[in-house]
Image (spheres, rainbow, N blue to C red):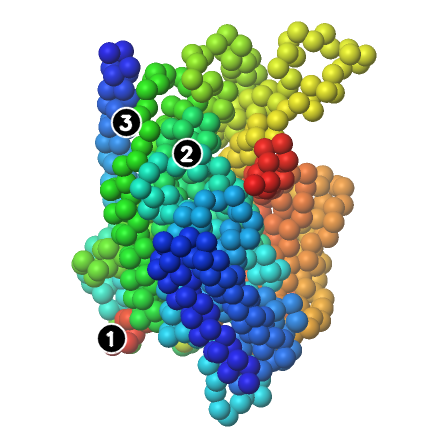
Amino acid sequence: MIAFIGNLLLWAAILCCILSIAYSRIYSKNPIRSIRYSSLFGVSQFLIILFSYILLTYAFIISDFSIVTVWKNSELDMPLVYKITGVWGNHEGSMLLWILILCLFGFLVIVFDTKLPRNILRNIIFVQSTITLSFLMFVVFTSNPFILQNPIPQDGFGLNTLLQDPGLIIHPPLLYIGYVGYSVIYSFAIAIMLEKQHIDGWGKWIEKWVYISWGSLTAGICIGSWWAYYELGWGGWWFWDPVENASLLPWITGTALIHSLIHFNSNGRHQSWTLLLAILSFSFSLLGTFLVRSGVLTSVHSFASDPSRGLWILIIMSVFIICSLILFFSYSERKLDKSDFILFSRGTFIQINNYLMMTSCIVVLLGTIYPLILDALKGDIITVGPQYFNLVMTPILILVAILMPIGPNLPWNDRINDFILKKLFISIVLTLSMIVLLQIIVEGKSFNLAVFFIGLGIWIIVISIIDLLPRNIDRISFSLSNFDLQAFKKINSPRLSSRVIHAGFGLMIIGIVAASAYAENKDTRINLGQEIQLNKFTIKYIGVSAEIGENYDDLVMNFEIYEEGKKLEKMQPRKRIFRKSGDITTEAAINRYFFDHIFVTVGEIDADYIYASISHKPLVRLIWLGGFLMVFGIVIRLINYKTKLFRD
Amino acid sequence: MRKNIKRVYLLLASFLMSALAVALILIALDDNIIYFYSPSEVDQIDNKNLIRVGGLVKNDSLQRLDDNSVKFIITDNIGEIQIFYKGILPDLFREGQGVIAEGKFNGDEFLANIIMAKHDENYMPKEVYENIRNN
């Protein structure tokens, strides 16, 4: 029954897509009718897919094992939360989620972007529905979640044990909102380019979508990194794994897009960049989808999929990318640019940022698909090691870190003035003093490049904070009686949010450098009652206990931990044994120590001893704190009423 | 005129940076490519560099040594490689299952830095699968 309705809904959705495409094109001579009907079917698409997704979730909840997808990815004893979120823990279900979000964004544009010119909306619906149609057909013909089987098994396989974790609840949806959000931005770009004349101010329409997608993608990537950190057991947060890179590529172009858009909205310049980046961001989303699901790359993250699916995704991806690029290169409606070229202007710095972002894109892309190319050409099987990425990204990152805080301070169309120079000078002095202080305290006489890199992060944060001080602070005589709160209230939101985001990035850099350069680790055997010393921490293994979970049993290794005699919170890493399958996962124990982590995970266990890996990672929490700030910053931007982002 | 000259400088700078970037990429790429070999291809390896090898863990070959390290043999049903590893073995490491080891050869022994094991019942790293299937 469920499968029958599910399939019916999918076909109904396909029909809606076809109809909305048709109405968006055929009745172009009668725009009102065209809009009305194509919008109607655009909204219907969304509602129908929503029902089908809820239906699939329902099948998971009631453990309907007549449906193959449920049987392969769920089991009776699994906690309810993983039955619900496990829907997107497999290829078919996650594809349906992908399509749901695709329709959702189309729906949101139809319903909320009411001030759009009809022609533009019509074309957006056209492109969005075409994308939806392609993926719907892909799902129905190669990855149908509603396939039946007979006889009906008593129980299912359960979700992959690595996925039965809170990370599954938030990471995929956020990531998908990010990836798929770029689809509607892509549709906007195509719609603009299909117009025969230049459209003024179109940049304002896609602002909120750009922020939402970027913010969601940032959050998704950060949470993914955090999840890998504690789940995969050895405390790494980024592996330059092909699937991770696949999420980074749209993020990089998305970042460039935000800045180009800002420039376009202020000045009307960088229109071509904005259009191109809009196309590239979605193209990279599609590439990511391809890499993850086609099975061409080995990765912890990839779905086990057969190559024929990969071929279809490759075709879909190529068509959308090639068509849009052809359109882009033949689009020539540009306003003549008569302004002066100033090196130290905000616009130029955004331009430089674009170049740096594109360079890092190419670098990461090359490293990611080089194994594919080599395999296809020579049959050699290789992996591109993380050293490649670190080596090539570092110089780019240095340049970005130096220039990033300067750019927003420069004027758009004026020459640099005294006030700005004064601000920069103070910032340089402050930063250098802090670096020197850091060097003295941490390193003393020895040289460590880490101090320089941390200095870059400090540089970004210092300028960001100084930027947020009231403009006339040097003329205010600082006393409690005339402390001007009003001046702080006058900070406008775009400025606040950009400084918060940049500061978050700086914080992230500090966290990454400190945790990499100053981490200490001991992999060793510990006997019962034995103590291990790691820096100023003493870790003692005191024995095993057990905890029972819904579909698993935990074998808990208990550790006491002391910092120079003072007892800290106990640590309980564990081996989680899933009862039905016998699969074992290792759950690490993480103690927070100010901004550091103490990280303990166990390997083999015996009656009187265990093998444990104990690490101290200084300032590692700054990585995710920085990420959080970046997302927080974009949220500030989105909810700010002054810029009327949501009032059309 | 001034505006154009500034533009030319910027273009020149961009071009130089691009050339530098490309050079950097090619150098970095060259040194950091990790080749994958199966046990039967061992003879072809004269690689002193970091490489990956993969195969099935041979039954009854896992031994724990005195200094807390382990050794085991991987096979693709034709050839074998003796692997030494000091560290914590992944949870899903089992005899008879597929693994990939990354490290360097020291004579006839392979000293592994990382061991990667399967992460679900049905998963086998593509490279290992291809080799087993072909043999």
Of the two numbered discs 1 and 3 on the same chain, state the one appearing first in sequence: 3
Instruction: Give the residue displayed 65% in from the left and 12% down from the top.
Output: A473
Badge 2 sits on which subunit?
A
Residue behind mark 1: B134
Q: Inspect this view and state whether residue A21 appears.
A: no
Q: Residue A77 location, x and y as percent?
A: 65, 78
* Residue that lies at the very extreme toward the front in this rendered image: A30
User: Mark 2 and 3 residues: CB-CB less than 8 Å, in contact?
Assistant: no
How many angstroms separate mark 2 from mark 1 (CA)? 61 Å
User: Relative to A560, does residue A387 appear above or below in the rendering?
Assistant: above
Identify which residue is drawn at 57% across, 27% down.
Answer: A495
Q: Residues within 10 Å of mark 2 (few under 14, many from 20)?
A: few
Tell if the residue under mark 1 belongs to the same chain as the one under mark 3.
yes
Query: How many labels sit on residues?
Result: 3
| Residue placed under numbered mark 3 in the picture | B14
Residue at the disc numbered 2: A200
Residue at 55% x, 81% y: name it.
A2
Give residue A49's position: percent from left, percent from top. Answer: 51, 68
**Whether marks 2 and 3 lie on the same chain:** no
Q: CA distance from mark 1 to mark 3?
A: 49 Å
Say what amino acid the circle numbered 2 marks: Asp
B60 in relation to A402, above or below: below
Identified by mark 3, the residue type is Ser
- Snapshot quadrant of residue A29: bottom left
Percent from the top left, x then y, of residue A92? 46, 70
Residue type indicated by callout 1: Asn
Say what secondary structure mark 3 lies in. Answer: helix
CA distance for labels 2 and 3: 30 Å
Residue nearest the viewer, comparing A86 with A32: A32
Task: Please determine whether, in this image, residue A361 is positioned above or below residue A150.
Answer: above
Q: Residues within 10 Å of mark 3 (few under 14, many from 20)?
A: some
